[in-house]
Image: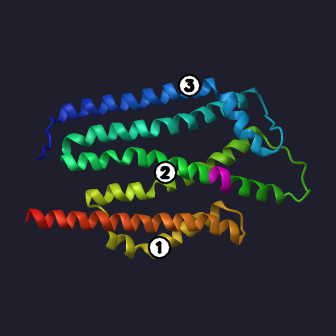
Amino acid sequence: MSTRQEMPFFEHLTDLRRRIMIVLATFLGSLVLCFLFVDTIYQELARRSGEKLAILGPGDILSIYVKLAAVGAIAVTIPVAAYQIWKFVVPALREREKKVALMYIPALFILFLLGLSFAYFILFPMTYQFVLGLSNGNFDLVITANDYFTFMFHLCLPFALLFEMPVIVLFLSHLGIVNPHRLAKMRKPAYFILCVISITITPPDLLSDVLVIVPLLFLYECSIAISRFIHRKRAEETALTS
């Protein structure tokens, strides 16, 4: 039986501040740890460029290393941040809701890694080679490490975040903010937006567009199916308690 726990307002603020500090400490600790191994991370990521990358000054070295360490720290911090959010809201949840909400933590991390892997191993090399091919021998090409990694992060990180869509929809469905009827009604504009995003971040050829559009549309349909399942379960629970 349940079991929402009441907490005074100031205790909520104290608890929130403590959890924010835990997340920040995790990020900073992960940042330092990743920075210790940043040379290995750099070598692994830079080898996809196919050539030795240039720098324009000593400041670029530190900037690049900090960016690489920061991306690694963000990946490590995501499950910790999700767990701290869960711990913060858990007093307001019933026992069954606690278990369901706890499932978000590994799901967020796994989907982030899947999106990042898809973008890095498939989307990025395809886009990178296409952009280089546009030079067509007309330019004396010098690729700086800063430009290379900026291009990589701007492409891969947004795509990794888009892969979080089913979990976000699941969470909003549990809160009753979205429902399958609303998502289905928004299907056409959502498809249009996802197609625009896909065409914008990929080379202008049909194969590249399809490789990106199909997973995003599939994720949206998964989101509708998840919302439909949650909506049906909520309706059944309401019918039983009434």
**Residue identifier under label 3:** 33
Q: Which residues are magenta?
A: 119-123
Identify whether 169 is placed above or below 148: below
Tell me which numbered mark, 1 or 2, is placed earlier along the sequence.
2
- Camera sees residue 83: yes
As drawn, is 87 to the left or to the right of 241? right
Local SS, label 1: helix
Is residue 43 positioned above or below 220 on the image? above
Q: Nearer the viewer, mark 1 or mark 3?
A: 3
Residue shown at 81%/55% (left/top)?
A: 132
Q: Could you tell me how many numbered marks the image carries?
A: 3
Residue 184, how many percent across, how many down? 38, 74
Q: Amino acid at mark 2?
A: Leu
Separation of marks 1 and 3 at Cα, in angstroms? 43 Å
Which-is-in-front pick, marks 1 and 2? 2
Q: Label 1 to label 2, Cα distance in Å?
A: 24 Å
Amino acid residing under circle 3:
Leu
Residue under label 2: 111
- Residue 196 lies left or right of residue 171; in this view the side is right
> Secondary structure beneath disc 3?
helix
